[in-house]
Image: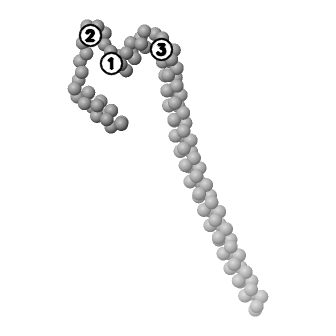
């Protein structure tokens, strides 16, 4: 009789240890799955950012190539410095000016 009782206790202990081990492995796999999903999302975001930066670099390289042209000088003078040609009349839309001023104040 003693032998059967000790086998039953050992059997229960072994089942508990096996159950704990299975739960631990399941938790580990679940954590790894979540980590892999997060890393894939991060990779996609980084790849999108890289493609945007490549496009920006391409645009800047084109701008560098054309920096000595008169068209580029005229563009900078008009857009950045607000210059106009002689006898040229500039019309300003008040609504657009208000929107731009609000946007500029918001950025500061």
Cα separation between marks 2 and 3: 24 Å
Nearer-the-camera pick, 49 or 17: 49
Q: Label 2 neighbourhood size at 10 Å, few (<14), some (14-19), many (20+)?
A: few
Q: Label 1 neighbourhood size at 10 Å, few (<14), some (14-19), many (20+)?
A: few
Q: Quick one: label 1 or label 2, which is nearer the N terminus?
A: 1
Would residue 98 be found to the left or right of residue 11 on screen?
left
As drawn, the residue found furthest toward the left would be 94
Image position of 35 with respect to 21: above or below: above
From the top left corner, tell me how far across and down residue 37 is, in percent: 56, 49
Image position of 73 with respect to 31: above or below: above
Q: Quick one: label 1 or label 3, which is nearer the N terminus?
A: 3
The quarter of the displayed image where residue 47 is located = top right
From the top left corner, tell me how far across and down residue 41 is, in percent: 53, 44
Image position of 40 with respect to 102: above or below: below
- In percent of the image, x 24 and y 12: which residue is there? 89
Would residue 59 be found to the left or right of residue 14 on screen?
left
- In percent of the image, x 64 and y 65: which residue is there? 24
The quarter of the displayed image where residue 94 is located = top left
Q: Quadrant of the C terminus?
A: top left
Location of mark 2 (residue)? 88
Nearer-the-camera pick, 21 or 58: 58
Helix, strand or loop at mark 2:
loop
Q: Are marks 1 and 2 in contact (CB under 8 Å)?
A: no
Helix, strand or loop at mark 3:
loop
Cα separation between marks 1 and 3: 18 Å
Location of mark 3 (residue)? 67
Cα separation between marks 1 and 2: 12 Å
Q: Label 3 neighbourhood size at 10 Å, few (<14), some (14-19), many (20+)?
A: few
Location of mark 1 (residue)? 82
- In percent of the image, x 32 and y 18: which residue is there? 82
């Amino acid at each position: 009789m003693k032998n059967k009782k000790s086998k039953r206790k050992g059997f229960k202990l072994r089942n508990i240890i096996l159950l704990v081990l299975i739960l631990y492995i399941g938790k580990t796999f679940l954590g790894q799955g979540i980590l892999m999903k997060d890393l894939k999302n991060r990779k996609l975001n980084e790849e999108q950012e890289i493609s945007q930066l490549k496009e920006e670099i391409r645009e800047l390289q084109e701008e560098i190539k054309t920096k000595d042209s008169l068209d580029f000088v005229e563009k900078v003078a008009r857009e950045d410095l607000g210059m106009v040609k002689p006898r040229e009349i500039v019309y300003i839309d008040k609504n657009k000016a208000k929107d731009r001023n609000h946007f500029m104040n918001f950025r500061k």
